[in-house]
Amino acid sequence: MARLIVAGAAGRMGRMLTSLIVQQPSHILVGAVEAKGVKAVGADAGEIAGVGALGVRIGDDYAAVAAPDTVTLDFTNAAASMEHLEIAAAKGAAIVIGSTGFTPEMESRARALAPKTRTLIAPNMSIGINVLIKLVAEAATLLNGFDAEVLEIHHRTKVDAPSGTALALARAIAAARGQDLQKSAVFGREGITGVRPPDQIGVMALRGGDAVGDHTVIFAGLGERMELIHRTQSREALASGALRAAAWLVDKPNGLYSIRDVLGL
Ligand SMILES: NC(=O)c1ccc[n+]([C@@H]2O[C@H](COP(=O)([O-])OP(=O)(O)OC[C@H]3O[C@@H](n4cnc5c(N)ncnc54)[C@H](O)[C@@H]3O)[C@@H](O)[C@H]2O)c1
C-alpha cells in the first residue's frame, strides 16, 4: 500500500493524479498540498479533482504531512519542488518529482539533496518518451553525421521552455555523440545565422492551445531525413507513470532514481 501525498493538488497533473489514486486499491491518498493563498486550500482534494469528497483537505504546509511512510507526487514548479525536496530529505519522506524548469544551480542542489531520501526525478513519466530517449541515443550513434534537431509543442499555459523532455532528448543525442550539450545546443534561430555547424543540436519550442506535449527528433542527412515522433494524447499516461514510479520507490534504499530505473530501460 503506497501512502501518497499530491503536491500541486489543484493543478492539471495534481487533479489527474488524485482521480487515478482513487481508482487503485493499492494506493491511498493521505495528503494534498497547494501553494499558500490558492483558492483550493482548505477544499477536499477529491472535490477539486472532480471525483467526490475523499476526506483529504488540501493544506499549504508540506512539512506538516511529509513523513517517512509517505511518497509525495510533486507536480508544482521547479522552485516549489526544490523546497519540497529540502523538506522530504530532512524528514526521510520519499518523493517523485515531475516538475520541470530546473536551473543548472537547482539541478546540482537537487543532486546533492536527493540521496538523503528516496528520490525519483523524471521530466517525463510516460513509458513511450522514455523508450524514445533510448531509441534516439541509438539513432544518434547510427546516424552520426546527420543533423539532429529536437522540436516540441505544449499547451499555451506551460511556463518553461524548452520542455524538460526536449532537453532530455537533446542530452541523449549529445551523450551518444560525445558532445557537450551546453556548447552544442541552440535554442531557436533568427536572422543571418550562418551555415549550420555539423555538431549543433537545435532545440525548438512551440506553444499553443491545449497540446499536452508532442516531441519530434529529426535526423537530417543528404537526400534523406528520419523523424521520430512521440505524441502525448492525455495526461493520464504521465500520471499513471508517476503512480507506477511511486509504488516502485516505496521500498527502495535512499538514492536518486530516474524513471528508466522503474521501467528497466
Ligand atoms: N514529468 C512529467 O511527466 C510531467 C507531466 C506534466 C507536467 N509536468 C510538469 O509538472 C509541473 C506542473 O504541471 P501542471 O500542468 O500540472 O501545472 P499546473 O500549473 O496546472 O499545476 C501546478 C500546481 O502547483 C501548485 N503549486 C505551486 N507552488 C506550490 C507549492 N509551493 N506547494 C504546492 N503547490 C504548489 C500551483 O498552485 C498549481 O495548482 C510543471 O513543471 C510541468 O512542466 C511534468
Image (tube, rainbow, N blue to C red):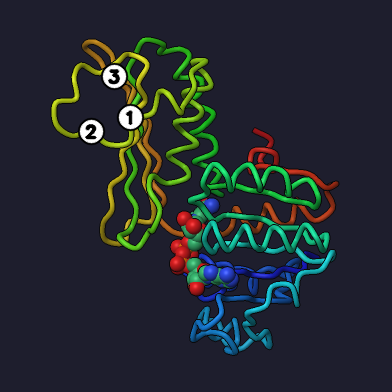
Q: Position of residue 149 (x, y in %)?
A: 33, 28
The residue type indicated by label 1 comes to Gly
Residue hosting label 3: 220
How many angstroms separate mark 3 from mark 1 (CA)? 12 Å
SS for dot 2: loop
The residue type indicated by label 3 comes to Ala
Return the residue nearer the eye: 125 or 145.
145
Is residue 175 among what the camera can see? Answer: yes
Relative side of 31 to 185, left or right: right
Residue 202 tag number: 1
Residue hosting label 2: 189
Return the residue nearer the eye: 232 or 198.
198
Indicate which disc, 3 or 2, sits on the residue closer to the N terminus.
2
Q: Nearer the viewer, mark 3 or mark 2?
A: 2
Indicate which disc, 3 or 1, sits on the residue closer to the N terminus.
1
SS for dot 1: strand
For the N terminus, the image quarter is bottom right
Q: Position of residue 111 (x, y in %)?
A: 68, 43
SS for dot 3: strand
Any atom of ligand 1 within 8 Å of the CB at mark 1? no
Q: Nearer the viewer, mark 2 or mark 1?
A: 2
The residue type indicated by label 2 comes to Arg
Q: Position of residue 172 (x, y in %)?
A: 51, 27
Return the residue nearer the eye: 135 or 151.
151
**Where on the picture, by quarter, is residue 244?**
bottom right
- Residue count near mark 3 (Cα–Cα under 10 Å), binned few <14, some 14–19, many ≥20: some
Residue 16, above or below 153: below
Relative side of 218 to 265, left or right: left
